[in-house]
Image (spheres, rainbow, N blue to C red):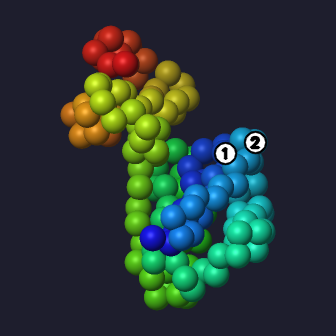
Amino acid sequence: MNYLAIDTSGKNLTIIISKDGKIYTYYDSECGVNHSVILMPKVEELCSKVGFDLTSADFFCAVVGAGSFTGIRIGVSTVKAMCFAYNKPCLAITSFDTLAYNKISGKTLAIIDAKHNGFYVCGYSDGKIIYPPSYIMKEELLNVLPEYN
């Protein structure tokens, strides 16, 4: 399966290309508020580097939150434009799913700092959601946390 996925939901920028069973990535840990400036040049650079033609994508994917509202808008808008331009389907994935991806057994709590003692959380058990995506304050997080790895 061939696809291009992007995550602009936080201060990081992640671009993933899956081409013929191989995964290629670009990661910038300090993108900050520059997603709108560097996203497309980095997509083009990675596509060129690995010989990926966007027309060969089976779908395009964007992380849809929780996270930075502006960052999410940039990523979703970019992916929706690609879907429209190449007549391909879109896949939305949450930040929680990306955080919990490699932890498929046991109970896991994906936590995103929302600042000001608030947190976005989602709990998983063996890959299934058992604590739905929520916004909670630090006190509630401290009560819930001991139940998870």
Split into 4 quadrants, where in the image is the C terminus? top left
Q: Position of residue 77 (x, y in %)?
A: 55, 70
Asked which quadrant contains residue 81, the reply is bottom right
1 or 2: tag closer to the N-terminus: 1
Residue 71 shows up from this direction:
no
Disc 2 residue type? Glu
Asked which quadrant contains residue 128, the reply is top left
Residue drawn at point x = 28 percent, y = 25 percent: 106
**Which one is in front, 47 or 51?**
51
Q: Is residue 23 above or below residue 79?
A: above
Q: Secondary structure at mark 2?
A: loop
Instruction: Find out whether the residues at labels 1 and 2 contact each other: C-beta distance under 8 Å.
Output: yes
Split into 4 quadrants, where in the image is the N terminus? bottom left
Judge from the rendering whether residue 92 lies leftward or rightward of residue 56; answer left or right. left
- Residue located beneath label 2 in the image: 30
Q: CA distance from mark 1 to mark 2?
A: 6 Å
Judge from the rendering whether residue 132 lies leftward or rightward of residue 117; answer left or right. left
- Residue located beneath label 1 in the image: 12
Q: Secondary structure at mark 1?
A: loop
